[in-house]
């Protein structure tokens, strides 16, 4: 491909910095205690059982190491209160029923014309041939993540949002 123009190293660095800045949210002062929020994330909320932060945690849900740089505090709050409102791509919930009576509900890992693979709530991998299924239901707007509206107080949700908003992928 012929070059249309040449960029200097400095210009390349500036363009790369600009591209990296796209989609990043601004740092905002939020109500809530980040230290308490981290405690709720690790213990009371049970978030670490399904989510990774800085290489630690479960693999059922998305990696949250830089969630504060990618999502606003309002988005994070909504995701905690109503997880089905904005399910991240790659986390489609699917229910299947096999001819042998087996029923599985989980997150779709892979699907092609002939097969589908799911991870259930215990993070167990299941693979099915579509010919062997009596039901295959894609649950758009559903999430395997529990809602925390009743599990945490509004103050605890503020703390958890403050903690998550502070996760910006920095070491």
Image: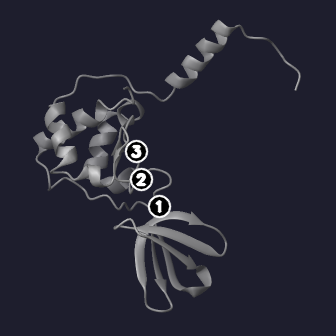
Residue 102 seen from this side: yes
Say whether marks 3 and 1 touch (CB < 8 Å).
no
Q: Is residue 65 above or below residue 132?
A: above
- The residue lying furthest to the bottom in this view is 100
Residue on which disc 3 sits: 63
Pick the front one: 31 or 116: 116
Residue on which disc 1 sits: 92
Say whether marks 2 and 1 touch (CB < 8 Å).
yes
Q: Compare marks 3 and 1 and give the one earlier in the sequence.
A: 3
- Residue 125, position in %: x, y? 46, 69
Crowdedness of circle 3 by 10 Å Cα count: few (<14), some, many (20+)?
Answer: some
Task: Identify the element where label 2 is drawn.
Answer: loop
Residue in the image at 48% along x and 69% along y: 118
Residue 32 seen from this side: no
Q: Compare marks 2 and 1 and give the one earlier in the sequence.
A: 2
- Residue 157, position in %: x, y? 18, 43
Q: Compare marks 3 and 2 and give the one earlier in the sequence.
A: 3
Q: CA distance from mark 2 to mark 1?
A: 7 Å
Total numbered badges shown on the rendered structure: 3
Residue on which disc 2 sits: 87
């Amino acid at each position: 491909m012929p070059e249309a123009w040449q960029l200097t190293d400095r210009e390349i660095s500036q363009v790369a910095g600009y591209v990296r800045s796209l989609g990043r949210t601004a740092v905002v002062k939020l109500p809530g205690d980040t230290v308490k929020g981290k405690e709720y994330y690790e213990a009371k909320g049970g978030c670490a059982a399904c989510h990774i932060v800085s290489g630690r945690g479960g693999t059922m849900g998305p990696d949250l190491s830089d969630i504060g740089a990618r999502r606003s505090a309002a988005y994070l709050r909504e995701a905690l209160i109503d997880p089905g409102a904005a399910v991240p791509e790659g986390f489609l919930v699917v229910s299947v029923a096999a001819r042998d009576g087996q029923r599985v509900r989980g997150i779709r890992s892979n699907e092609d014309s002939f097969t589908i693979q799911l991870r259930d709530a215990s993070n167990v991998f299941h693979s099915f041939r579509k010919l062997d299924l009596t039901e295959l239901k894609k649950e758009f707007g559903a999430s395997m993540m529990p809602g925390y509206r009743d599990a945490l107080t509004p103050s605890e949700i503020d703390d958890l949002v403050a903690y998550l908003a502070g996760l910006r992928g920095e070491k």
